[in-house]
Image (cartoon, rainbow, N blue to C red):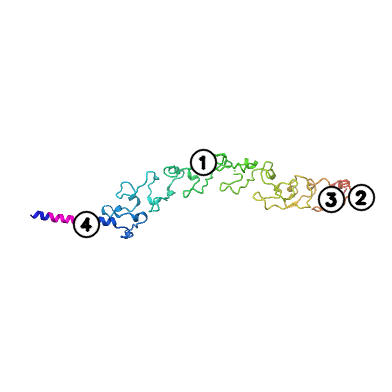
């Protein structure tokens, strides 16, 4: 009879222990963040972790040694069963929190590109692991160049291709700025005039911005004159109200190719008459005005055009009334008597 009594005692002890284990498991299954200050453990529960039952992480009631890193749980074959990386996840051995900043959801992750190598974007951005090239990147450099030649790692837009090393004048011959290439190309709607249609898109534009565009005036115009282009057909010409020109080129007054402003000023109304096509610089040399033979090479061959009493033109010129002067008649010119003309009026 002795052994049955011992057996009963052992049974009762095991039963009590079993009840205690069940009670502990039940408590562990029901205790949440609201019942226990998990912050004291050094691992505060945030996001989706606040709604997880304790036994999900503390398996079999074991508290010590519970993983604290993301991949300690969120990986295949771990003691704690949690959502692992998907099969199409970006290939990386970086800690989860490097990209996933939100513990409420895996969405909104941002990959840290600091450790990536240049020209290797397509190893991830291939349409399977990460977003690949869009449909409008199917030709030219957009289809062949590495993403980081145009895009930043922080955001796809705005993008700007790195033009360093580009050969000047090759904009429309390097497979980029070509009509029909689905790239930025010369606009056929607005670049139809001679200059715009034939010059290179870097004769006028820089690679930082299309606007403002300024023609590179180091290249000569078709005629060597400003009005070879600024004739109202290739480029803008003189506006309404502009001083009347008698063959002068724009550059005679407009000294800047960046702006029309800053012109030397309008020609005076009483300017000495001169032959058509004569440039201002022929007579206006530096800060002086040519006199004598140099000046008279570009003015009217009829002396009394200027040396008559009226009209009065600029310059210190001798004026006499014709007819009237020394018995001159209306049909005569100064040269009728003054054969030496401007070189010696006093020695006719």
Task: For the residues labelled 1 and 3, say whether their Cβ atoms are less than 8 Å apart.
Answer: no
Image coordinates for residue 269, horizontal then vertical, percent: 77, 52
Element marked by disc 4: helix
Relative horizontal placement of residue 115, taking residue 236 as reference (left or right): left
- Disc 4 + disc 1, Cβ < 8 Å: no
Mark 2: few/some/many CA within 10 Å (<14, 14-19, 20+): few
Are there few (<14), some (14-19), or many (20+) residues within 10 Å of tag 4? few
Q: Nearer the viewer, mark 4 or mark 1?
A: 4
Question: Taking the image as drawn, is residue 343 in sight?
Answer: no
| Tag 1 secondary structure | helix
Read off the residue under disc 1: 141
Residue at (36, 54) in percent of width and height: 48
Residue 312 position within the rendered picture, expressed as x and y whole percent measured from the top left: 82, 53
Answer left or right for 167 relative to 288: left
Residue 344 falls left or right of residue 278: right
Q: Are the residues flagged by discs 2 and 3 in contact, CB closer than 8 Å?
A: no
* Of the two numbered discs 4 and 3 in the rendering, the one whose residue sits closer to the viewer: 4
- Does the CB distance between marks 4 and 3 fall below 8 Å? no
Counting residues from the N terminus, which is met first, the one under dot 4 or under dot 2?
Answer: 4
At which x and y percent is residue 76? Answer: 32, 46
Residue on which the image places disc 3: 307
Judging by the rendered image, the residue that carries numbered circle 2 is 327
């Amino acid at each position: 009879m002795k052994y049955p009594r011992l057996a009963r005692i052992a049974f009762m002890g095991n039963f009590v222990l079993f009840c205690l284990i069940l009670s502990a498991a039940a408590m562990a299954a029901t205790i949440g963040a609201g019942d226990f200050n998990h912050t004291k453990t050094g691992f505060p529960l945030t996001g989706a972790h606040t709604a997880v039952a304790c036994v999900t992480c503390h398996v079999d009631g074991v508290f010590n040694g519970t993983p604290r890193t993301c991949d300690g749980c969120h990986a295949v074959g771990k003691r704690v069963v949690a959502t692992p990386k998907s099969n199409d996840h970006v290939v990386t051995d970086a800690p989860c929190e490097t990209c996933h900043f939100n513990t409420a959801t895996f969405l909104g992750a941002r990959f840290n590109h600091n450790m990536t190598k240049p020209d290797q974007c397509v190893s991830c951005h291939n349409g399977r692991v990460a977003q690949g090239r869009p449909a409008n990147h199917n030709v030219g450099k957009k289809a062949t160049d590495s993403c980081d030649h145009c895009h930043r790692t922080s955001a796809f837009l705005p993008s700007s291709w790195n033009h360093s090393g580009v050969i000047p004048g090759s904009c429309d011959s390097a497979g980029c700025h070509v009509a029909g290439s689905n790239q930025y190309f010369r606009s056929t709607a607005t670049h139809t005039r001679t200059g715009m249609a034939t010059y290179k898109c870097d004769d006028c534009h820089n690679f930082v911005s299309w606007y403002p565009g300024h023609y590179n005036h180091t290249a000569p115009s078709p005629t060597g004159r400003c009005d070879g282009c600024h004739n109202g057909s290739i480029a803008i010409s003189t506006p309404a109200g502009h001083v009347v020109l008698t063959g002068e080129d724009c550059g005679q007054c407009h000294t800047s190719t960046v702006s029309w402003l800053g012109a030397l000023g309008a020609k005076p109304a009483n300017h000495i008459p001169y032959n058509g096509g004569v440039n201002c610089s022929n007579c206006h040399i530096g800060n002086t005005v040519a006199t004598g033979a140099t000046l008279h090479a570009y003015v009217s061959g009829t002396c009394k055009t200027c040396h008559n009493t009226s009209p009065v033109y600029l310059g210190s010129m001798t004026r006499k009334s014709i007819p009237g002067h020394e018995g001159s008649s209306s049909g005569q010119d100064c040269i009728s008597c003054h054969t030496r003309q401007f070189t010696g009026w006093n020695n006719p």
